[in-house]
Amino acid sequence: MSEIISVVVGGALAIAGGVIATTLEHRRERKALAYALAGEIKAIVDIVERRKYHEFINQMIEVIEKTRQPDFIRIRIEQNYFVVYEANAMKVGLLPRDAAHDVARFYTYAKSIIEDVTDDRFSPQTDVEALQRLKGLQDLIGRLVSLGNKVAQELEKI
């Protein structure tokens, strides 16, 4: 009888050890992912702020309002600023629900902004169209910065 109890206890301890090891590895992976994404998001927000994109768009809006001539930003982007996200997109579900949601929103905003400023096919034809697109871009950039700051803080607390 004591042999059976020893086997059962030994098996239970082995299973518990495996569960604990898996849980600790899952927690470590979630923290590493959260910190890496926080770093990348903070860098993107910092770049947007240091390059003063918001102020530049304000200036363009003022010029268009004065001259009534259509204009729009065209930027060539050669670097991939989403390396961490793209390499780990399938793991975002490891994050807490709200953080995963905000990470997905942040990168969708960022990709949308890039699409807007790199696509030559959508040049505005009128000043009204240019102003509408620039104000929309300005709003997206504001949302990106605000959400980026929020989500980076969330991720650093994980």
Image: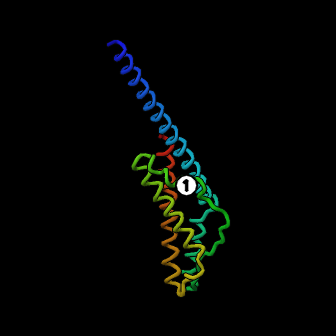
Q: Secondary structure at mark 1?
A: helix
Q: Is residue 81 left or right of residue 134?
A: right
Q: Quadrant of residue 60?
A: bottom right
Q: Position of residue 138 (x, y in %)?
A: 51, 68
Which residue ends up furthest to the bottom in the rendered image?
125
Badge 1 density bin: few <14, some 14–19, many ≥20, Cα 10 Å: some
Location of residue 80 in the rendering, given as x and y in whole percent from the top left corner: 63, 61
Q: Amino acid at mark 1?
A: Tyr
What residue is at 55 percent from the left and 42 percent from the top?
Answer: 32
Q: Which of the 4 image quarters holds residue 11?
A: top left
Residue at (45, 31) in percent of width and height: 18
Q: How many marks?
A: 1
Residue at 53%, 63% in the rendered image: 110
Q: Which residue is mark 1?
A: 85
Horizontally, residue 11 falls left or right of residue 38, namely: left
The x, y position of residue 120, in whole percent, is 60, 80
- Residue 83 lies, with reference to residue 158, above or below; the image says below
Identify which residue, 18 or 78, lies in the foreground.
18
Quadrant position of the N terminus in the picture = top left
Q: Residue at x 38, y 24 (%)?
A: 12
Location of residue 115 in the rendering, given as x and y in whole percent from the top left corner: 55, 71
